[in-house]
Amino acid sequence: MASTWKGLLAAGASLLSLGLVSTGAVGALGAQAVQAAGRYGGTLNIEITNDPPGLDPATVLDNDAGYVMATLYDGLTAYKPGTTQVVPGLATHWKITNGGKTYIFYLRHGVTFSDGTPFNAQAVAQWIDHLINPKNPDYYAKQKGIQTFVPFTWGNVTGYKVLGPYTIEVNMKSPNGEFLADLAMVWDGVTSPTAVAKWGSQYYEHPSGTGPFVLEKWVKGQYLEVKANPHYWGGRPYLSSIIFQEIPNQATQFLALRTGRVDILTDVAPNEVASIRSDSHLRLLAEPGLADNAVSLPVQVKPFSDVRVRQALNYAVNKALLDKTLYGGLAQVMNSPLPKVAFGYDPKIPAYPYDPQKARQLLAAAGYPHGFTATMVVYTGARGYNPIGGQELATAIQAQLAQVGVKLKLDIVDPTTWLGMIRNPNFHLMTLTGWTGDNGDPDDMISPLFNGNAFTTGNSSHYNNPQVNALFASALESSNPAVRAHDYDIIQKKIMADAPWIFLNYPDMLRAESTSVHGFVPNPTYFYFNMNQVWLSR
């Protein structure tokens, strides 16, 4: 992968000591970054698996929604194309003061939201207020059934102050070493305060951002069309429009790419790789990604409340065989909750080897010499961290666990139902799970999965270790790379020993495209950023 957080955090520490980060007038995503050889016009078709539950960054945590929202919104910061390196976005530069607890953002001029609302410090203030102020009539959390990342970015923020027409100050209770990276996430796209006030709880269907594209049409269960924003501050997009085609079936997804119905395949199954590589009209894009693929174990209920049972299940699953047979060698066995490309990853931590005899011994010691019966919730279709799909993976795991006496009943549900189930604080079943990193920071990668206060985001196992929680807090508040790396090393080792998951694999990030597509650079977060740079030669 092109970026590493070691270099970024070292640079961040230097910039923190200087108190200033700055760039040129246009920034890394400006017009100069667009390929000069591009051709204007045309419609790009991108496959997604499911209908997004909404398009409000503050209230939706869903990959298919994120793919679309990355084209509609900008953040105050952004990622350098193809990396998770933080660069200017809607803020051209920023100053960090007060020991890391105060950020002053200098905002880009001449930007408007898609509904015509001017982008300025007052608009940003209104956006922040609706995220942190429960008394705001448009407070995001007043909506029911939301899934949100807001507490992770904004829970530490105490207030803001407009310092000028294009200058705003943000204050925090304590330093946050992840804050600038958070602001570039698709979940922190800046929304139009006018549209939020106008649509209220229905805003999720009427998005308005400052991004390179604008929502044109949404036919539920079929497709979403976004059209080019001709006034985009980062340069007029080459494409006239993008259509996100909803294709739930994997075989149909691949057929759509082969026949030209779609130009970019978001969900590439490993068994399709050889066919893609052999087709002169197609191009495979594969690289290590910020992704974990696993089974979550409900540590709060028997028999999973016994760590010996959880460890036994890790020994009982032959992950290397799964990687070879199901993933075509395009995945690696997990030895840590952090992916190999993440800052702080420790390659010396041992993975759980395949050892069914050890698994039986542990189960017997825990009081289950003949195994037990359990239910595992399984999502349908593929996900970014599981390109083969939920049912195929679950069936293989079911067969392997049966060899040590663990009988699994599979409860197969659609992805929207599945997300609602596992993010319920009362959830207490096994489930397939996983995570794709949103910003390249280790806190974003594993805190939502294993922090004791994250039951409503990704911690479906309800793992709650006070030592790990304290280390998460310590690492987040530091801007020193060495301190953070030390804390995350302890966190990784403790989580692996406690085994709240069956740690399966790190799948490669796979995309496939038609050779008529040019300028598309996949981002390690998996989302469709910088699509104003993409053009078609057909």
Image: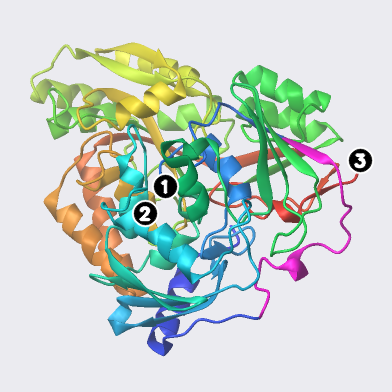
Residue 445 relative to residue 386: left or right: left
Q: CA distance from mark 2 to mark 1?
A: 10 Å
Q: CA distance from mark 2 to mark 3?
A: 44 Å
Q: Earlier in the sequence, mark 2 or mark 3?
A: 2
Name above or below for residue 131 compared with residue 281.
below
Q: Position of residue 179 (x, y in %)?
A: 39, 65
Q: Nearer the viewer, mark 2 or mark 1?
A: 2
Q: Earlier in the sequence, mark 2 or mark 1?
A: 1
State the residue position of label 2: 130
Q: Position of residue 266 (x, y in %)?
A: 64, 35
Query: Residue 429 got which mark?
Result: none
State the residue position of label 1: 58
Name above or below for residue 211 compared with residue 119.
above
Residue extent of the magenta highlight: 25-45
**Helix, strand or loop at mark 3:** loop
Q: Position of residue 15 (x, y in %)?
A: 45, 83
**Helix, strand or loop at mark 1:** loop
Q: Nearer the viewer, mark 2 or mark 3?
A: 2
| Colouring of the image | rainbow
Label 1 is placed on what type of residue? Ala
Which residue is located at x 35 percent, y 59 percent? 129
Label 3 is placed on what type of residue? Arg
Magenta stretch holds residue 160: no
Quarter of the N terminus within the rendering: bottom right
Residue at the right extreme, as displayed? 538
Q: Position of residue 46 (x, y in %)?
A: 70, 35
Which residue is located at x 52 percent, y 76 percent? 166
Which residue is located at x 58 percent, y 48 percent? 70
Q: Quadrant of residue 476?
A: bottom left
State the residue position of label 3: 538
